[in-house]
Image (cartoon, rainbow, N blue to C red):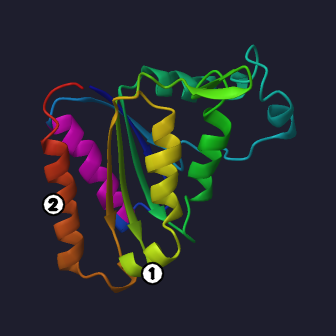
Amino acid sequence: MRALVLYAHPDPASFGAAVHETVVSGLRRAGHEVDDCDLYAEGFDPVLSCEERVGYHDLGTNQNNVAGYVERLLRADALYLCFPVWNYGYPAILKGYFDRVFLPGVSFKLVDGSIRPNLWNIRRLTTVTSYGGSRWRTFLMGDPPRRQIKRGLRAVCHPAARVSYLAHYDMNRSTPQSRAAFLARVAQEIARIQKPV
């Protein structure tokens, strides 16, 4: 399996960094090919420019500024998202990645004005994330990131894609034990992926 890991956290000493390392090392240990895309380390620019917005639907040119990122996405069999939930959403750099890379002709195509999924190469979609608030508080807010991934992002992947969403809630009151247990759960989940999907 060729896994693209999208990582979005600026602090290399954070729990998010430990989550990212657990995901990447677990995939490599299981024998999978990993393209580790650390958006902050790579200096990804999340800002959709006026030029990009104007040319958004031009399939001949809309990928020009992000061609390398598009190529990496299209080469992958699996997409792993590692990010913290901030203000009930993605970090801006990850939202910008979706805005700039998930383009017409890449993640979806327009057929008679209707959107059709186009990332049929993605047969596994896994999210590993953390929330500052509790699961209950997140539920009351509607848990936008979970919905966006399990509905919106899932909708542009292969129809048979396997989806998993692993979240550590209540980071504001987490303990070394709760964090270690979550990392163990993540490692266990990845270890179960033995064969290409």
Q: Is residue 84 something that shows in the picture?
A: yes
Secondary structure at numbered mark 2: helix
Residue 114, image x, y percentages: 68, 28
The residue carrying pointer 2 sits among few (fewer than 14), some (14 to 19) or many (20 or more) residues within 10 Å by Cα, namely some
- Residue located 75% across and 42% down the image: 48
Q: Most extreme residue toward the bottom, as rendered?
A: 173
**Answer yes or no: do the residues labelled 1 and 2 have beta carbons within 8 Å?**
no
Secondary structure at numbered mark 1: helix
Taking the image as shown, residue 62 lies to the left or right of residue 55, namely: left
- Residue located 41% across and 22% down the image: 121
Read off the residue under disc 1: 137
Amino acid at dot 2:
Ala
> Which-is-in-front pick, marks 1 and 2?
1
**Is residue 52 depicted above or below 18 in this figure?**
above
Magenta segment: 16-29
Read off the residue under disc 2: 184
The residue carrying pointer 1 sits among few (fewer than 14), some (14 to 19) or many (20 or more) residues within 10 Å by Cα, namely few
Residue 187, image x, y percentages: 17, 52
